[in-house]
Image: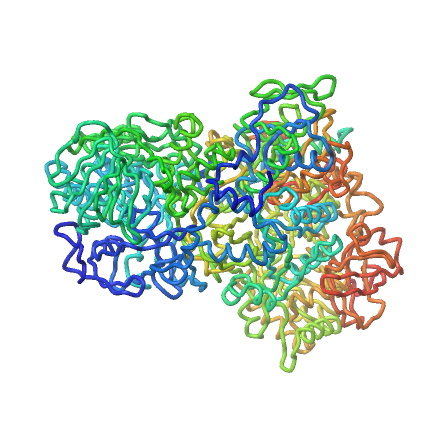
Amino acid sequence: MSQQSRISGGLIDRSQTHSFTFDGRRYEGHAGDTLASALVANNVRLVGRSFKYHRPRGIFTAGSEEPNALVELRSGARREPNTRATAAELFEGLEAASQNWCGSLRHDLLAVNDLFSPFLSAGFYYKTFMWPKAFWERLYEPIIRAAAGLGRLSGLPDPDSYDHGYLHCDILVIGAGPAGLAAAMQAGRSGARVIVADEDFRMGGRLNAETREVDGMAGAAWADSAVAELAAMDNVRLFPRTTVFGVYDHGIYGALERRTDHLRDGEDGPRQVLWQIQAKRAILAAGAIERPIAFPGNDRPGVMLAASVRTYVNRYAAAPGKRIAVFTNNDDGWRTAIDLSAKGIGIAAIVDTRDTEPLTDIPGAAIVMGGRVTATRGRHGLRSITLAGGRTIETDCLAISGGWNPNVHLTCHHRGRPEWRDDIAAFVPGPELPAGMTVTGAANGTLTLGAALADGHNRTSSTLMGLGFRSGGAQPPRGDDEAASVSAFWHVSPGKGRAWLDLQNDVTVKDLKLAHQEGFRSVEHMKRYTTLGMATDQGKTANVPALAIMAECTGRTIAETGTTIFRPPYTPVPIAAFAGRSRGAHMRPVRLTPSHAWAEEQGAAFVETGLWLRAQWYPRDGETHWRQSVDREVVQTRNSVGICDVATLGKIDIQGRDAAQFLNRVYANGFAKLAVGRARYGLMLREDGIVMDDGTAAHLSENHYLMTTTTANALAVFRHLEFCRQCLWPNLDVHLISVTDQWAQYAVAGPNARKLLSKLVDQDFDISNEAFPFMACGEITVCGGTRARLFRISFSGELAYEIAVPARYGDAMIRALMAAGEEFDAVPYGLEALNVMRIEKGHVTGAELEGRTTARDVGMGRMVSADKDCIGKTLSQRPVLVAEDRPVLMGFIPVDRSQTLDAGAHFLSSGVAAVTENDEGWMSSVCHSPILGHAIGLGFIKRGRERVGETVRAADPLRGKETLVEIVSPHFLDPEGERLRG
Amino acid sequence: MGFSAFRIIKEGLTGNRGWTPHWRDPEPKAQYDIVIVGGGGHGLSTAYYLAREFGITNVAVLEKGWLASGNVARNTTIVRSNYMLPGNEPFYEFSLKLWEGLEQDFNYNAMMSQRGIVNLYHSDGQRDAFARRGNAMHLAGAGAVLLDRDGIRQLCPFLNFDNSRFPIHGGLWQPRGGTARHDAVAWGYARGADRRGVDIIQNCEVTGFRIENGRCIAVETTRGPIRAKKVGVCVAGSSGRVMAMAGMRLPIESQVLQAFVTEGLKPIIPGVVTFGVGHFYISQSDKGGLVFGGDLDGYNTYAQRGNLQLVNDVIEAGMTMMPMIGRARVLRSWGGLVDMSMDGSPFIDRTHIDGLYFNGGWCYGGFKATPASGFCYAHLLAKDEPHSVARAYRLDRYRTGALIDEEATGPNPNLH
Amino acid sequence: MIINHPLLGPRDAAEFTYLGDACLIERPDPEAENAIEVFHDYVYLRDNPAGEHRELWFHEHGDRSWLVVTRNTLTHEISKVELARDVALSRGRGI
């Protein structure tokens, strides 16, 4: 029979029937159900297994605080472990499966753990599994790991999409229960920009679950009309299915909106949106969560929180039992009996821990004042309870109420600590709230309806005034205040039984007492030793009773005992939602140079360098190995001419009367006297004396320079220069702007470089060696009037130029260069060939200027001018940085020229042990030199300059290699620089 | 009585009535040979090794709050010795060797689990830097394996090999790396020290140092003055605040490192994996939670919480590296205060005040150092000379230029 | 966090890059006799206060201003934001 526990009434839509499966069995429910309420309607009681003892468990709550009813939702790559059935909205075709069992849910082999529970008490694992030592990783731990964990990830990439969004408002109302709706109405009427967020798919909070009235209407109907009124206001935005999960600095709230979780797979993505809400003020109306009473056997399916039982009956029209008993320490528990009785559900008993007069009479129910439940029966579902004194009562559902805990979670995200209030036996928000936050209603300890409505209204009025809005003369919505007296009662002494506190992690009252016995007496120790409150529900129902028991053990008050720290998120948030669309190929943007399309046409292999994609080499037909391409590019460049895209270099335009002075201070070498039309290599230090970057600065015209930086450091250098300009020398007349993206730039290198360029450079400009010598620069035109800049600089060691044109001509320029180069067999060369040629020349890059080396280390010590100050000069003189035995840059060649070299090898003298103490340095860059015909390397070795000709070991134990290498000058090719001056 | 399976069975059969506190709760004495300020992982291990290795037991550990309430209470539990520089690598390898015998040594199961750590690389340059590091590890006896893309695919088939902005080229793998149960490490040291006579005094905040004629002779505390022949400060995260009471300015900034744990899941990630672009590292605890983190928030703070932007940044890298974790839910995030030093490396040293010693500057990596930090600090306190593997951790190294800058980012604490 | 830029109004901290203590404005005199010592203190030592902290932020994804932000390191509350250039000028950082 379908939906045998479905009763009349409720807020479900019976016109829409959804079929769904749980553990493969097909059931039906209705629109407006949660998975949990549909399971209740179908009388499914056993829904899961606990973490440690694999005890059978049923639905315990009707909200996101659920500790027991966790399921794997959906299938395939969309499988979603640990989903709370109580918060999962039902949809047609929903698939859910129970989790954490071995065998089947009903017959879980791991339930054997429960038999051994006397030996598995809190923290038992800290005391054993240590012998024999090797057994931990081979035996004990694999068993523990396999048994631990709850649901299973699919192991497949998450196929859904997620968005990030940013919102601004005057007032953010968190929670749309009675206080929240009253607040939102008042805020909305004032004209303020209002956002209302509620985790439920139906706004109204407890009004949807109770039989109370507001303004003379049924509570749920009033909530509907309030929501409709808010929806009609242009200044109000409503976010149902949205959890505000964290409070960040300066009024920023993180919120997760679940947009398609209530739909079938993949409909109308994105699945979820992570909103960053910037709110001037926030009204926290997050309500309260009911807490249980611990008693022996309190974990059986059928034991539920009393208000949740009401929720299932009143909102979802699903009866969690046929004969229900209530166990309470407060007036609110009685309302469960009253409401259910009115619906015709049998009430077996009301057991009230208080020794007072019964609140009312319930026909047919045994009323036991001053009573205690001391035991329960029913393996997979509750059958009876036993009271103190031995009386047994048949019941299939026990509704328990230990009072209500205001939802203080978000009030504590900025160090605030909640305060204990004896009159409601609960923690309420303390005085230190996040700036701009006001707490109202049950979240603030105002637990009755009429007072909460008024409180929401009134606190919002004052908040609006603070923001300068007029709230008008509207009266707060009216509701009666119900009886809400509570008398703290935490647990029935377990005797020989076990009374659970944390249902998911299987932490019992005895575990807490044992932790105390073993000296774990602060709440944090208690939590960590027993794992209480560390499950997926973060102890939302378990923590306060546990604190009370800790207080009992230590003889302190609950207020003195204090709470553990509440940290974001309020309820768990999927990892993918935080990433949004910035994942996979879209993790970061891609920067492309102006010649990218052309390089693609050439079939270039590209490589990521920072955000840039750069051509690595340009393979030609018949080349089967990258080395063939690279060797060809190098040889052809050195023999004739090659062209390389260097647009990724950082370019900084520097202007002003003090530009020369500025350069002179930021570079280690002198720049004060660089003539117009000349460029110079520049070495830049950090203030700690370590090399920061290198590049060139070209003096384009009076008071106008262009600096280049390495690709990798472009941003950092620019930031550093702005720091120097604004913070250190604010009086210098100098202005900086990054022009990296504004200019395309190509190196044209090789003996035929000049001939090639002469074909493109307009005739007005003389680029002969005499008119435009090495290190000349100038503004020219090319191809009949296109503005360009020409620099006679060389990284390859060849006669070379770099030519820059505005980025929009970059594509045309590379094509023009290649066309002009055809007669010389000009080749494009990529990063690898560039690297080979610079190693042959002994030029350094990031592998050598690696953030720990000094100018002296890389052989440029003399560039640090003695005649002037510069950034980093003073500290570069510290004793260890100028010590004689520092590793310095040298060249290395294999003694056996047929051998290859590997970067990352460490240098050892012959005959010494391969240990740290004997480490003399490392190889930083290597390549095969097609010109020299063997491998060459650059590296750092102690006292290297004195050791030219010495043979040392390049040890590479990581790759099982050791190569004898000779120490040589780092300048392998043309050390005198004749080629580049040619 | 010691902990063992036998004892668990015996206690289980007799109602677990025989278990006693893991450590005493003594009143502070008026005087000790050595007072350790800070009852975190490093302070407790220092006390343990003072007693165990150097026979000095007239020792008090003073803790402001509850025992082990600092960074040992909230970290990502990773243990490894994959450093590059000679000032660091022998120290961390010494630490890893101590980890490997720790549980039997202090008779407490800290669940040290050597399931390996792999650092991914995404470019040839990164590979070369890892090769240099891997070889440094070999020279220090730490062992390492350089894996190419296929090697990584075998080890971690669940990573994103096909659709990443920064493709995985390979990784540096230290099979001996792993994780440990962080609280239990501190508790094991506490119990081991306590059983050897050390007084562990909780809820005792140091409010000042009594310094006479250039010598520290006592600490002032919320529970009265306590005299000591030597005082060892060990309060990473709060080093600046505590040493200011001795009139010292430090080369340290306090910053926040956020970390995250998901709901419990069945085992899916074998060891520790780190991404090489941006910063992201992840492992799975024995309880099933995915534990992960990334960069610092990057500004000075004592607030023990971070901001949302950084959470997004960290997780973007995580979802790029292994998109299968997308549907796991973040259960809890937290922010721990870290002592960011100016070169990213720590200090274990005397100060210019006689009798006052300093241990701090552990940045985001103090957990793995817990055994060696305590051992070497105990060595320094007991013998007044540095242990050989910790001799580079001097307070004056920025004066001399003997920097230990693994990240090579210079004196910018937030970039280390 | 939100930084109220003196020229541009409130901006998300994500637009900025952090450097550190604003004492970095006070670059010492390289001619000083004990220059290494004073540069050591300048580059490496920090007050690192738990409370009000004056610190440098760079509007990297904005107008490239360096700002001096006065922020409480216990609460993250920002009480003042100034252009670093103005601060430097007022501190007599000359040419």
x, y percent for residue B215: 73, 21
Q: Nearer the viewer, residue A143 or A939?
A: A143
**Residue B298 lies in quadrant:** top right
How many marks are shown on the rendered structure? 0
Q: Quadrant of the C terminus of chain A?
A: bottom right
x, y percent for residue C7: 46, 37
A212 sits to left or right of A564: left
A43 sits to left or right of A694: left
B68 sits to left or right of A535: right
> From this viewpoint, is residue C87 visible?
yes
x, y percent for residue A398: 24, 44
x, y percent for residue A873: 74, 40
| Residue displayed at 85% across by 60% down | A952
Q: Nearer the viewer, residue A768 or A456?
A: A456
| Residue displayed at 62% across by 57% down | A649
Q: Quadrant of the N terminus of chain A?
A: bottom left
